[in-house]
Image (cartoon, rainbow, N blue to C red):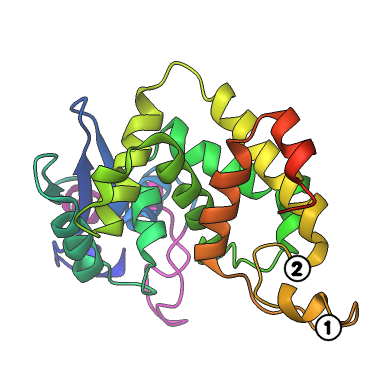
Amino acid sequence: MKAVSCGFHYLFSTVAEGQDGRVTVVDGVQRLSTFLRFLKDDLKLTSLGKEHPLNGKRFTDLPLHFKERIEDMQLTLYILDKSAPEAARLDILERVNSGIPLTRQQMRNALYDAPATRWLGEQSKSELFQSVTGGSLDPKMMRDREAINRFCAFKLLVSAEYASSDMDAFLAAALKKMNGLNTLDNLLISFTNGLKRNKKLFGRHAFRKSLIDAAVSKEAPRSVINISLFEVMMVGLSELSSEDFSVNSRDI
């Protein structure tokens, strides 16, 4: 706000265009929110120095020429076109992000802010998911949501769609698929079954290579979650019927 009031018209933001034509702010949300709150008198200028005449002023307290300067400021938008390849959209977002470096999943969460990403968030916070994973997938970096996103991708999409080995495009395709479904109830049932069955069979060592040591000693230390094991065991066990799981659980 200090820079804007001094005539530096540098306020910009990056938005992503969705398939339905709507745009979502993916970088610059804090800047835009701060600017809007200042215009609404929710914030005041600070850290200008005790003797500065504008220190502590809200928007309505500013001299007229400062108000006009702020109101006439131009906003520059960088638009991530919906037709651009997924890898390119993520790379561009990674480059324009001026704050703390984002993980790929955090970028996807911003690009596909819709029912699918909200569903991932809800399931990552569920008591069952936290119990089976031991809360060891970093929620701040969205490692938990990425794991669930991977399950959804391998569950909903045919393997041919992963032929290029482009995981970013594969996970994005899953989110698009989820956003196009009328309901995610069936996916939730599969996800829940996968978690419950892995917990029943492997306990605290679910999705971890330490299961091998645990077979020898119950006190074996638990290793970190292996995402490949998570994908395989979640999808594999979720596709078994209740009867097949009951009959074959010992062999598994």
Q: Residue placed at 77% from the left, 81% from the top? A: 213
Estimate the x, y position of residue 81 in percent, counting from the top left: 11, 43
Between 48 and 245, the residue placed more toward the observer is: 245
Judge whether residue 92 is colored magenta: no
Residue pointed to by mark 2:
205
Asked if marks 1 and 2 touch (Cβ < 8 Å), the reply is yes
Estimate the x, y position of residue 136 in percent, counting from the top left: 68, 69
Task: Classify the position of the C terminus by image quarter.
Answer: bottom right
Q: Which quadrant would residue 16 be assigned to in this image?
A: top left
Estimate the x, y position of residue 166 in percent, counting from the top left: 24, 58
Which span of residues is magenta-colored? 44-69
In the depicted structure, whether residue 206 falls above or below residue 158? below
Q: Tag 1's secondary structure?
A: loop
| Position of residue 131 in the picture relative to residue 110 (left or right) | right
Task: Classify the position of the N terminus by image quarter.
Answer: bottom left
Residue pointed to by mark 1:
220
Principal secondary structure, stretch drawn in magenta: loop
